[in-house]
């Protein structure tokens, strides 16, 4: 499943997808805070650190 930022900001929807074992990609705002490996960063800051070869359309 894929969804835009409206769906990406709903933690209940993400939780339901995870419970059902459904793979998903949901957009989130760049200023949304994300915790990765105990480090809290904005989604935009995390995206900047991703190598160009990992971005696909």
Image (cartoon, helix red, strand yellow):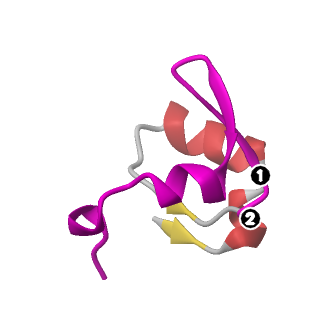
Q: Secondary structure at mark 1?
A: loop
At label 2, counting other C-alpha atoms closer than 10 Å, the crowd grade (few under 14, some 14-19, many 20 or more) is: some
Please provide percent x and percent y for residue 6: 77, 70
Q: Is residue 33 magenta?
A: yes
Please provide percent x and percent y for residue 47: 51, 58
**Quarter of the figure with the N terminus:** bottom left
Horizontal side of 47 relative to 14 (left or right) equals left
Residue 32's disc is 1
Please provide percent x and percent y for residue 2: 49, 69
Q: Is residue 54 above or below residue 42?
A: below
At label 1, counting other C-alpha atoms closer than 10 Å, the crowd grade (few under 14, some 14-19, many 20 or more) is: few
Residue 29's disc is 2
Residue furthest to the top: 38
Horizontal side of 33 relative to 43 (left or right) equals right
Q: Is residue 5 magenta?
A: no
Residue furthest to the bottom: 57
Q: Secondary structure at mark 2?
A: loop
Which residues lie in the magenta part? 30-57
The answer to whether the residue labelled 2 contacts the one labelled 1, judged by CB atoms less than 8 Å apart, is yes
Q: Is residue 38 above or below residue 28?
A: above
Residue furthest to the left: 53
Label 2 to label 1, Cα distance in Å?
Answer: 5 Å
Q: Residue, x 30% and y 59% (percent of image)?
A: 51
**Quarter of the figure with the C terminus:** bottom left
Q: Nearer the viewer, residue 20 or 18?
A: 18
Please provide percent x and percent y for residue 9: 77, 56
């Amino acid at each position: 499943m894929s969804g835009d930022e409206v769906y990406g900001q709903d933690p209940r929807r993400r939780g339901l997808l995870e419970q059902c074992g459904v793979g998903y990609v949901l957009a989130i705002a760049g200023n949304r805070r994300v915790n990765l490996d105990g480090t809290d960063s904005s989604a935009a800051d995390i995206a900047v650190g991703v190598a160009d070869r990992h971005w696909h359309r």
